[in-house]
Image (cartoon, rainbow, N blue to C red):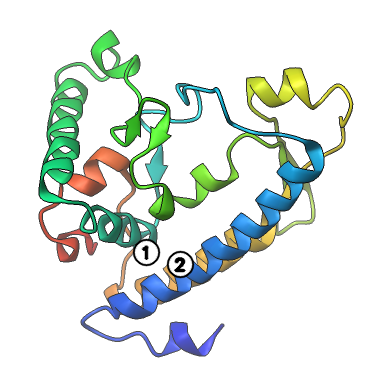
């Protein structure tokens, strides 16, 4: 375990968590950009409706905190617009989680196919599109397919292209473990809308 995890203390070291998340995200972006460039793959022209799911879950406090930090960088009008979308989305979920008004919606940050908080988007968003593999602790592999655009345009000529997510998941797990050591419990999993709806990032603490 890294020293930074061990040194977390109450109150939670938000700056430290943000630094580690950004450091991890930068490594993910480098791997993804390289794979996409070599494959000739791009999300350009996609509306994001499939990848930008309304019920996309953030499982760690660190990711939730980082996303909230991004929201605070926007001007008041744009921030209020996103928060209004959050309120409407959460109301639709509470009223009928399996109804069309919720299930047919996209992420509250999707603006005409582009992410309003692209720089702060969660790990799963950064990895979407390209097929992946994960090595489980028991040594077995788990595979995941790419998006529809990748399957139709890239997979026929590069059927074996996959991004290994194992190290990324392990690092995020290490960051979250530091939070668990401080709080004594696992973080609450939340959707993007649920994460952004909290008025104060400290309210996200489990």
Q: Residue at horizontal 67%, vertical 50%? A: 33
* Nearer to us in this view, 121 or 79: 79
Q: How many marks?
A: 2
Q: Is residue 99 left or right of residue 60?
A: left
Q: Quadrant of the N terminus?
A: bottom right
Q: Residue at horizontal 77%, vertical 35%? A: 40
The disc placed on residue 21 is 2
Q: Is residue 117 visible?
A: yes
Residue 203, quarter of the rendered image: bottom left
Residue 113, quarter of the rendered image: top left
* Nearer to us in this view, 13 or 71: 71
Q: Position of residue 206 (x, y in %)?
A: 24, 62
Q: Is residue 135 visible?
A: no
Q: Residue at horizontal 41%, vertical 34%? A: 114
Label 1 vs 2, first from the N-terminus: 2
Q: Which residue is mark 1?
A: 62
Q: Position of residue 20 (x, y in %)?
A: 46, 74
Q: Is residue 194 left or right of residue 175?
A: left
In this view, the residue farthest toward the top is: 100
Q: Position of residue 25 (x, y in %)?
A: 53, 61
State whether residue 202 is above or below residue 79. below
* Nearer to us in this view, 190 or 64: 64
- SS assignment at label 2: helix
Q: Residue at horizontal 29%, vertical 80%? A: 13
Q: Position of residue 138 (x, y in %)?
A: 75, 56
- SS assignment at label 1: helix
Disc 1 crowd, CA 10 A, few/some/many (<14, 14-19, 20+): many
Is the C-beta separation of discs 1 and 2 under 8 Å?
A: yes
């Amino acid at each position: 375990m890294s020293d930074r995890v061990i040194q977390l203390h109450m109150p939670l070291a938000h700056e430290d968590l943000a630094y580690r998340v950004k450091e991890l995200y930068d490594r993910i972006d480098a791997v993804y950009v390289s794979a996409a460039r070599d494959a000739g793959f791009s999300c350009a022209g996609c509306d994001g409706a499939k990848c930008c799911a309304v019920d996309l879950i953030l499982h760690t406090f660190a990711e939730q905190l980082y996303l909230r930090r991004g929201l605070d960088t926007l001007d008041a009008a744009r921030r209020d617009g996103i928060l209004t979308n959050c309120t409407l989305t959460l109301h639709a979920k509470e009223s009928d989680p399996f109804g069309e008004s919720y299930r047919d919606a996209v992420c509250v940050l999707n603006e005409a196919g582009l992410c309003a908080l692209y720089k702060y988007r969660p790990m799963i968003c950064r990895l979407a599109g390209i097929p992946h593999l994960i090595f489980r602790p028991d040594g077995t592999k788990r595979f995941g397919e790419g998006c529809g655009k990748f399957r139709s345009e890239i997979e026929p000529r590069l059927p074996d292209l996959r991004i290994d997510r194992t190290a990324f998941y392990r690092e995020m797990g290490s960051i979250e473990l530091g939070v668990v050591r401080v709080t004594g419990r696992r973080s609450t999993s939340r959707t993007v809308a649920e994460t952004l709806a909290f008025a104060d990032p400290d309210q996200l603490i489990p």
